Amino acid sequence: MKKYLLLLGMTYLGCGVAAEPTKTKNTDKQAQAKNDTYQGADMVTYGTSIDRTFPDTAKATPTYTIDKADVETKVNATTVEDTVRYAPGVLIRKRFIGDPNGTLGIRTSNSFQSAHTSVYADGMPLHNPLRTSFNGAPRWSMVSPSEVEYSEVLYGPFSAQYGGASFGGVVNLTTRMPEKFEAHLDAMGIFQDMHRGGRNELLTGFKTNLSAGDKFDKFSIFGSYNHFENEGQPQTPRTAAISGAGGTAVTGGQFENQPTGVPGVYFGDDGVAQQTTDLYKAKLGYDFTDDLKGLFTIAYEERAGKTDDPLSLLKNASGNTLWGGATTSGLSSNTLANGGVYRQTGNTFAVPGSAFSVGESERNALNYGLNLKGKVSDNWRIDTTASYYDAFKDRSVTSNLNPNHPRNQNRGQVTDVDAWWAAYDLKLATDKFLDRDNLSFMGGYQFNHASLNLDVYDSNNYLAQSKDTYTSDSGGQTQINSGFSQLEWRFMPDWSVMAGARLDHWQSIDGHVRTFGATNNIQNYADRDASRVSPKASLEFSPDAWTFRYSFSKAYRFPIAEELFASVSRLNSLSISAPGLGPENGYFHNFMTQYDIPRGYVRANFFYDKINDEIANTLQNINNRQVTTFLPIEQTEAVGVDLTFQQNEIFELPVDLMLNGTFIDKHISKNSRNTALVGSQWDRLPKLQANASLTYHIMPVWDSSVSVRYRSDSFQQLDNRDTEANVYGGTDESTFVDLKTNYHLKLHPHLKSTLSAGIDNVFDVNAYENHPYPQRTFYVKVALDY
């Protein structure tokens, strides 16, 4: 009941204070440079500029924009995170198509530091303020790719509007609303030729999207249904280190080194990753005036996943498949006495029965919010959003043993997650502060409350999802109240200076970790609170086609519920929390230079970050069990540069070219808790990322694109001992080449069709980022628009 009362109270907060001003001339030079672009027939416009109804709230922050036309021509977009696939310095660990754990990393924050990044859709937060590391992915599937009008990536915490969850950056998704009656239907087929680790299969999937909308005077309405299902390649190769002696003689194992180079064996996988989602969404808009618009959004998602066909390569002397060690009571074991130790060609290794367990998951979630945006007077604009997300059913069920195991008794584990958050954001801005044309002001208030609880049960019948023995209960809540403002002074022609600050008051509430069994362990943590002030500043000089801008920020990021309280022991994973964690704090610098060219621009950003007490999400695979811990690293330093070249109609040909690259060197500079880590490279962060795309508009109705994604290798462990390539648990250097072609056909004056085909990973590169990435994947799509 408390969460509903909290949301009701937020909805009644008054109008408010908000975003940051823009200069009198257009400062979105990326969008401005794309105005004069190649025009096809009346059916397609490439590189259209972006019309914002609110001042640029983060002008001091480096920004990269991707509009709908960019995605339609270049990207085989199956889910919405694909829209930012080629943005500089962005790394989304999308392990397979439909991955619920598509974590986001931007610049110097790796993809397991998901608490360092924020994602918003029409002002509603999609990022997860409760969890980080592998299960802290944004709720990408609450938005379908076809409804996004444009996406923006903001790099670093240089705007007072954004708190510590912008250490890496922010992704803003803006969806469209109809201006007249419209209807859309598309269907896509997905085909992956997977041949890895003893499997040779064609994995398939499809997605469909149906939407319609209309506008009646001041009212507008939009509704959509998005269905997605796919078979992804197995995500967890089953491996073990060579150790010990004795055991059952077996065949079938494939010998390969572990990530640290020690001898090991590969003996199977966890099964094909099957995902299904259904998204139902409605949006209602009302134009109070031509410049003030309200929008109500409600979305309901049903998501289901399962792995039910694990592969075991191990055979005994009689040719029977072996499924790991187990006790006579149907529990997993990896001991010699329980048949969990094997020997092949003189090499001994242990295999627990849980290595071949099956499982399923289900998540039903409701997300809704109300936004008001536009002019409230001649000089003032408002942007205010109240929103709520509730995963009211989030359950995963795992068996102890494979159903084919001779000792299987259908015992398993059930995990229930209770997760919800509520947010309120209120911003006002003016470009004529105190009636002065050279002063702009932005101010605002934000509120976020997030609650997480994890309950784990042992089950005597996982097929019936029975919850027979309560094993653990952990969780808690965090809350942040924030006030912020910025002032810009355009003190000379082409010169401006900006200064601002943000005050965050953080609280942790009801933290607890309770384990039950022979000896109960009940820990209730005292509530905590803290406040921090984050200053911001920037200086800009923008003569003619040039822009030079230096931006500075000191920012704080407070720990979230999972880091503080989530201690969970599961069959194949263990998470250890740290209730005493304090805030991370860092100094961030960025120097940008940009030169506008006809129909494009050239840009360079040089950046330097120094972060104290940076919270590391360390994940290690120990005997087929994933162990996650959270610990502060005393100090890290990062220096980097990103370069971008973008031009439409290059050499006055119907060809668009985009190139970008990001180089980052981030290392641990101080760490008195473990001095051996000093000098180590930051984990899961490639030193070099590069993207390129070339789009050829063959005809006004036909275009084709080739794109390239490059990532250098990186470490998965902070001690940098994992140097082995092409194995589970490591991260490889990779170059993926993608193709896409579209043909637009007008069937009727009001009915248009688009036929698309594409290939991701054309050259079938086999690469790992802890888990294996997809191999060559084909797409076919047809779309109808009225």
Image (tube, helix red, strand yellow):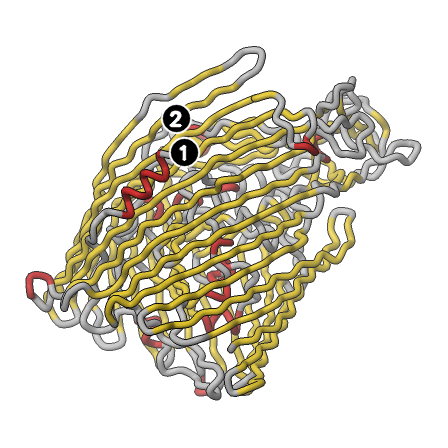
Q: Position of residue 708 (x, y in %)?
A: 55, 66
> Which residue in the structure is indicated by mark 1?
561
Query: What's the residue at 66%, 47% (across, down)?
Result: 273
Q: In front here: 226 or 206? A: 226
Image position, residue 316 (x, y; %): 87, 32
The answer to whether any part of residue 302 appears in the image is yes
- Tell me if 407 is positioned left or right of 460 in this view: right
Disc 1 secondary structure class: helix
The answer to whether residue 610 is visible is no
Residue 400, position in %: x, y?
69, 29
Helix, strand, or loop for circle 2?
Answer: strand
Q: Which mark is residue 511?
A: 2
Q: Are marks 2 and 1 in contact (CB under 8 Å)?
A: yes
Q: Residue 311 versus residue 108: which sits nearer the camera?
A: 311
Q: Is residue 540 above or below residue 422?
A: below
Q: Residue at x 66, y 52 (%)?
A: 232
Q: Quadrant of the N terminus?
A: top left
**Callout 1 amino acid:** Ala
Residue beneath the point at 37% across and 40% down: 636
Q: Decide which of tag 2 and tag 1 comes sooner along the chain.
A: 2
**Residue farthest to the right?**
318
State which quadrant residue 375 falls in: bottom left
Residue 592 percent location from the top left of the image: 30, 62
3D distance between C-alphas at marks 2 and 1: 8 Å
Q: How many marks?
A: 2
The amino acid type found where label 2 is placed reads Gly
For the point 33% across and 21% down, the residue is 526
Hey, which quadrant is residue 328 in on the image?
Answer: top right
Q: Is residue 121 above or below residue 749?
A: above
Relative to 241, 555 lies left or right: left
In this view, the residue farthest toward the front is 216
Res 729 quadrant in image: top right
